[in-house]
Image (cartoon, coloured by chain):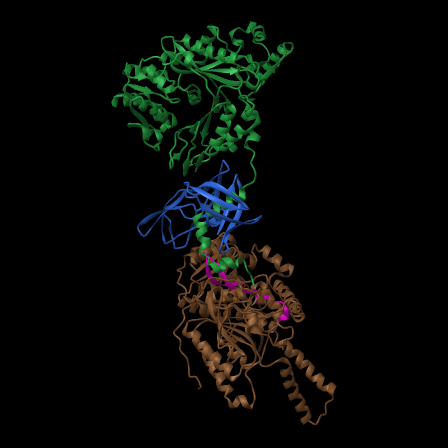
Chain colours: A brown, B blue, C green
């Protein structure tokens, strides 16, 4: 494969301006992540210490192989909910390495609201278990939760993808022979009791871990029985009397040592084999992405320059380089794994849609995972394009994309608007992982368009009521709509709502994709098959 | 991946990593890239680490590694932290002996207040035509022996209780 | 009185060393082995191995009837006792004599005489050889102070009932003798409830010098020069050398002739060693006589060129001495290091373990008398000495250099040994200067066991990289993850 010849001038003024703008954004992003991970009110830190419990990050350190990466999902989940008081939605999820193998990790963060389940907590956990199911990843649950957050129980409990889905997914994992282990390092009350009990293995930490359907206060209220935590659901009782618990650990260290030992004994299923090559770092420095991504989202940039800072050796075999040029398709390697890449270099036309559909079929035929780099404002509109069947060609692209059997991965690199989001494997389209860059936006259309559209509706309604509006009055209607919309399309809103698996520093994209691809190969790849292409 | 190494009584917690081309030993003081290649001598190796190259002779015993280097022999005890933690299972022992099935007490060997050692017989029971000797789960002091010789007991009755361990 | 089959009633390095010479002389050979004992070098040399039994291995090696019976059973006409065990046991010698088996060593009478320290000292003193002056109060309490005065200064007053240094007083001047005696008496009463005392000459920073002698039992005795054995830990020698750097040629002749004279006085038969305390002022006093081959005999062999075991066997076979005094040279310098399984940093605590790797040094002027084999086991059943490293050089400087190089190349892995400690002693400037005494190791204990440069990271790296389970655990991590390291998004 040939190396991409970069045309970037790192001394150019616009490059430097872009670089400065992105650096500023990343400073804020990293600060927010740091705060979501570590900054807690002192009383919560004190409470954990008093309870003789380790924090969730320390627990992860004990669980994971030293010197190995951890791909954390949705660190900033719920960052725009609950007045920002539930950092990370009170749970840590991600893919980590235990005894050399990839596991999905679901760990309550008891330093946030005692690890209570908020609506976004449930969403984050269900998503993690979906990742485990899709990729056949063993799961390690680290349980330490106060239970559902009762004031918001409607958002936690009843619906299809709420609390029950956590346990349903656990059952489905077990049914699919995907092992799970739970380390009980705090209370698992009510529904929470099913996390360890639906796990193949569980370990209870003596003194701090407990499992019960109703805790002591509830028992007292319900039946008048007075009983202590340890007698009711402590490690000794469960491991020697009820059989609800498998192992009793004297300390947190002991618990995670046992957990590691148990994980190491699980059968290793050979991973799906795809085309690979020897590793090669990108020839161009990934940090140069900061200067390539324009500080103004409307400025066009060449996705090949982006790919050159992510793929192995900056090497790219481009498919149909002279046809449908707003859609860049081609083959590259990421951490040695051969992938098919689809990247937007402009709006999707008929030819670019057809090119994408054909390329995806090539990849499915060849068992080549797909990676989407989104910078898309949508499919082209207008009479000429409708006549050429842009809706039909877009449907072909969706059919090929949605019907793909190979694992798909999406990076929202800049804009993700309208049906372009669908064609380029947006959230609804089962990307195994989907990450956003911090300046990226997602919405049905761009902020200005949307604000104008919404403002126009309002203005026309007022005009129908016979009101003449001054420029100021129009602006007074339009500005708040624009402000709100701008905020709604931001990456922070998306990540707060778990429309993605997290915001990425662009320089981390290569590793995040490498881990995602590697994890996806725990699941087999089916024979290619499709629905009906409208020809 | 982790080991505790003990040299001259001093313990160091380490973990070994490998970045694809070389090993890196990580100690609390920092990381040391290192390489060990065999030579023609029995147990002979060349060690490269910290910018030096050393010829050494080495033998790996079950708990310690012996290294002869620069004319001196050194003993490095190796401790797997997981194995050390596993030894704490005993600390998590129960204070109670719970009847595994219904039966009759055949004999009682200790009385409350007696000091007992782990594994010391406390009482003999008969259940399902089998005599079983129940022993102390840990060192301690007997707090209660609720049943006397000849008494029958039910499933999960407490047959012996040790005084709680003092922290 | 020819010898055709020799039983070596010993084990370890000395059994192997005796067997080698016996085989070279064409004798049939046999050696003992306790049922629980690991195979050693001696078992590879001997023609025959006689299994002995006993509640402990040491008890078996001390079992006179069993060993005499073994000798008779296999038709051995001579027994070489080595050192230790039954080598100075008069009853054993008498039992062998009764059974008609030749004992390679002196008569039981001489063993009995020299085995009794008080009788031996009396015997030597009566014949005019030097013994350290002393006076015992009990002999004649009335004349005690007078007799103490004749001991000479400095002198040491000790409570007769004492021990552990309590109540001991050093007197350097006659003027304080009587008050010190009274003080010592009061202390003796206080500590031990017994005020009786004795005094002896206090020898400051003494050296241990001994002389190898060989007699034919007819009164012909030659000496094979001296050995200095001042390097001792817990009163046991660990480095010996010859010639002694302390002696002038005149002193050497005097001490060696004295030793030969003592041996002549008992019509000594076989190999023996007369031990002396040597004071810094050049005076020397008879200490005791060992009626056997010494552990450190090889240094004598390397400077004289004689095989002392061969001489022992000649004499036992009635062939007499092969040498006259005039043709026993003292050429160059020889040093012996005792390689022991012990931890010099932990009060010489014996160590045990499996010998995982053994590579003993060799080369010009290097001799190893080893009692261990690669793959063997070191237990607490026997003395912790594993082997002896003996070097020879043209002079003391060369001998020290060779000893250091050899001990540094002495690879015994799997059990803690004192090789590093021995090297530290050899490297000590006082040792190089010959400025030592029997208290040297105790005085220098801190400098000799001080840790060298901190190489713990190198050692840990070696231990980690040779730990197959650890490396296996690390390498099971997919390469991509190893390369990513502790990356976090």
Q: Is residue A32 left or right of residue C24?
A: right
Counting every numbered tag in the picture gives 0
- In the picture, measured across the screen, residue A93 lies left or right of residue C39, that is right
Q: Give the answer, above or below, for where C193 lies relative to A142.
A: above
Does A401 lie within the magenta span? no
Q: Based on the displayed image, in which of its 4 quarters is residue C8 positioned?
A: top left
Task: Measuring from the top left, give residue C395's x and y in whole percent.
Answer: 50, 22
Q: Closer to the camera, B102 or A508? A: A508
A87 in the magenta segment: yes
Q: Position of residue A153 (x, y in %)?
A: 55, 72
Which residues are the magenta region?
A: A80-107
Closer to us: B167 or C427: C427
Q: Residue at x 65, y 65 (%)?
A: A27
Residue C193 found in image quarter: top right
Whether residue A224 appears in this view of the structure is no
Considering the image in quadrants, where does the C terminus of chain A appear? bottom left
Look at the picture and state if A245 lies above or below A348: above
Residue C282 location, x and y as percent?
Answer: 55, 13
Q: Position of residue C434 (x, y in %)?
A: 55, 22
Q: Is residue A507 above or below residue C417?
A: below
Up the image or down, B167 lies above or below A350; here it is above
**Can the viewer see residue C328?**
yes
Q: In the image shown, does C379 or A355 lie closer to the viewer?
A: A355
């Amino acid at each position: 494969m040939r190396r991409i010849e970069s045309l970037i001038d790192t001394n150019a003024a616009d490059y430097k301006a872009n670089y400065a703008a992105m650096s500023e954004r990343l400073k804020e992003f990293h600060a927010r992540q740091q705060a979501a991970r570590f900054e807690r009110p002192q009383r919560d830190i004190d409470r954990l210490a008093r309870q003789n419990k380790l924090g969730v990050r320390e627990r992860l350190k004990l669980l994971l192989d030293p010197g190995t990466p951890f791909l954390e999902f949705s660190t900033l989940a719920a960052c725009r909910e609950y007045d920002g008081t539930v950092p990370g939605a009170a749970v840590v999820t991600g893919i980590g390495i235990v005894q050399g193998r990839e596991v999905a990790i679901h760990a309550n963060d008891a330093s946030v609201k005692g690890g209570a389940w908020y609506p976004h907590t449930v969403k984050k956990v269900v998503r993690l278990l979906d990742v485990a199911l899709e990729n056949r990843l063993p799961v390690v649950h680290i349980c330490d939760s106060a239970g559902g957050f009762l004031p918001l129980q409607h958002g936690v409990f009843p619906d299809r993808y709420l609390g029950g889905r956590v346990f349903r997914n656990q059952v489905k994992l077990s049914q699919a022979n995907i092992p799970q282990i739970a380390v009980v390092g705090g209370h698992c009350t009510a529904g929470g009791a099913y996390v360890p009990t639906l796990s193949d293995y569980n370990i209870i930490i003596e003194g701090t871990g407990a499992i019960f359907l109703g805790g002591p206060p509830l028992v007292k209220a319900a039946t008048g029985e007075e009983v202590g935590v340890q007698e009711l659901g402590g490690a000794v009782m469960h491991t020697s009397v009820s059989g609800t618990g498998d192992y009793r650990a004297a300390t947190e260290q002991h618990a995670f040592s046992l957990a590691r030992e148990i994980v190491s004994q699980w059968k290793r299923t050979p991973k799906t084999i795809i085309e690979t090559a020897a590793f090669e770092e990108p020839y161009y420095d990934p940090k140069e992405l900061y200067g390539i991504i324009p500080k103004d989202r409307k400025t066009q940039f060449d996705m090949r320059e982006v790919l050159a800072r992510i793929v192995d050796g900056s090497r790219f075999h481009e498919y149909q380089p002279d046809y449908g040029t707003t859609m860049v398709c081609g083959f590259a390697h990421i951490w040695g794994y051969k992938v098919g890449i689809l990247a937007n270099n402009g709006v999707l036309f008929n030819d670019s849609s057809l090119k994408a559909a054909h390329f995806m079929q090539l990849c499915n035929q060849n068992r080549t995972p797909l990676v989407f780099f989104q910078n898309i404002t949508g499919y082209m509109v207008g009479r000429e394009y409708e006549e050429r069947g842009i809706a039909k060609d877009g449907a072909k692209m969706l059919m090929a994309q949605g019907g793909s059997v190979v694992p798909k991965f999406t990076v929202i690199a800049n804009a993700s608007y309208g049906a372009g989001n669908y064609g380029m494997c947006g959230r609804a389209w089962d990307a195994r992982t989907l990450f956003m860059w911090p300046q990226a936006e997602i919405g049905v259309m761009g902020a200005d368009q949307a604000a104008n559209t919404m403002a126009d509706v309002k203005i026309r309604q007022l005009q129908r009521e016979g009101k003449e509006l001054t420029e100021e009055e129009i602006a007074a209607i339009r500005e708040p709509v624009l402000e709100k919309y701008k905020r709604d399309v931001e990456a922070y809103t998306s990540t707060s709502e778990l429309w993605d698996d997290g915001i990425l520093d662009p320089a981390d994209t290569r590793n995040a994709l490498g881990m995602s691809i590697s994890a996806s190969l725990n699941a087999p790849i089916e024979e290619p098959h499709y629905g009906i292409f409208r020809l | 991946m982790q080991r505790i190494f003990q040299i001259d009584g001093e313990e160091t917690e380490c973990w070994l990593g490998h970045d694809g081309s070389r090993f890196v030993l990580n100690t609390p003081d920092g990381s040391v890239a290192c390489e060990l290649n065999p030579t023609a001598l029995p147990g002979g190796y060349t060690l490269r680490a910290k910018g030096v190259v050393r010829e050494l002779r080495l033998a790996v015993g079950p708990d310690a590694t012996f290294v002869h280097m620069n004319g001196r022999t050194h003993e490095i005890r190796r401790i797997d932290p997981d194995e050390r933690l596993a030894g704490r299972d005993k600390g998590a022992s129960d204070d109670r002996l719970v009847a595994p099935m219904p039966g009759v007490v055949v004999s009682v060997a200790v009385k409350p207040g007696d000091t007992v050692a782990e594994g010391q017989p406390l009482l003999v029971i008969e259940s399902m035509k089998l005599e079983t000797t129940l022993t102390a789960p840990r060192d301690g002091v007997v707090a209660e022996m609720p049943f006397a010789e000849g008494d029958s007991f039910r499933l999960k009755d407490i047959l012996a209780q040790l005084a709680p361990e003092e922290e | 009185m020819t010898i055709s089959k020799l039983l070596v009633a010993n084990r370890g390095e000395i059994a192997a060393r005796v067997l080698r010479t016996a085989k070279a002389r064409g004798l049939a050979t046999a050696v003992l082995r306790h049922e629980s004992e690991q195979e050693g070098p001696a078992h590879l040399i001997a023609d025959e191995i006689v299994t002995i039994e006993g509640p402990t291995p040491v008890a078996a090696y001390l079992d006179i009837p069993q060993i005499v019976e073994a000798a008779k059973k296999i038709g051995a006409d001579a027994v070489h006792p080595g050192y230790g065990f039954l080598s100075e046991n008069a009853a054993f010698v008498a039992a062998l004599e009764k059974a008609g088996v030749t004992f390679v060593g002196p008569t039981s009478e001489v063993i009995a005489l020299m085995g009794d320290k008080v009788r031996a000292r009396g015997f030597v003193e009566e014949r005019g050889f030097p013994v350290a002056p002393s006076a015992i109060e009990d002999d004649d309490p009335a004349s005690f102070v007078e007799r103490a005065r004749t001991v000479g200064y400095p002198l040491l007053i000790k409570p007769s009932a004492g021990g552990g240094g309590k109540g001991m007083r050093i007197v350097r001047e006659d003027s304080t003798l009587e008050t010190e005696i009274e003080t010592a008496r009061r202390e003796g009463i206080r500590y031990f409830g017994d005020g009786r005392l004795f005094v002896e000459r206090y020898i400051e920073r003494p050296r241990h010098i001994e002389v190898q002698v060989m007699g034919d039992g007819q009164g012909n005795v030659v000496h094979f020069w001296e050995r200095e054995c001042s390097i001792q830990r817990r009163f046991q020698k660990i480095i010996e050398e010859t010639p002694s750097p302390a002696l002038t040629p005149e002193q050497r002749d005097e001490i060696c002739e004295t030793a030969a004279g003592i041996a002549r006085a008992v019509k000594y038969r076989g190999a023996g060693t007369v031990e002396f305390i040597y004071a810094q002022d050049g005076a020397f006093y008879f200490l005791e006589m060992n009626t056997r081959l010494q552990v450190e005999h090889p240094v004598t062999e390397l400077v004289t060129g004689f095989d002392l075991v061969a001489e022992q066997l000649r004499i036992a076979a009635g062939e007499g001495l092969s040498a006259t005094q005039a043709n026993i040279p003292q050429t160059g310098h020889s040093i012996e290091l005792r390689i022991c399984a012990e931890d010099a940093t932990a009060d010489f605590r014996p160590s045990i373990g499996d010998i995982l790797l053994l590579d003993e040094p060799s080369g010009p002027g290097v001799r190893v008398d080893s009692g261990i084999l690669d793959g063997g086991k070191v237990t607490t059943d026997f003395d912790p000495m594993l082997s002896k490293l003996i070097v020879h050089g043209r002079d003391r400087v060369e001998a020290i250099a060779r000893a250091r190089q050899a001990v540094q190349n002495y690879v015994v892995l799997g059990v803690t040994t004192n090789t590093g400690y021995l090297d530290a002693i050899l490297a000590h400037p006082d040792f190089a200067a010959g400025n030592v005494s029997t208290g040297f190791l105790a005085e220098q204990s801190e400098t000799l066991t001080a840790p060298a440069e901190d190489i713990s990271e190198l050692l840990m790296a070696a231990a980690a990289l040779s730990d197959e389970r650890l490396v296996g655990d690390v390498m099971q991590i997919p390469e991509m993850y190893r390369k990513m390291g502790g990356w976090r998004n």
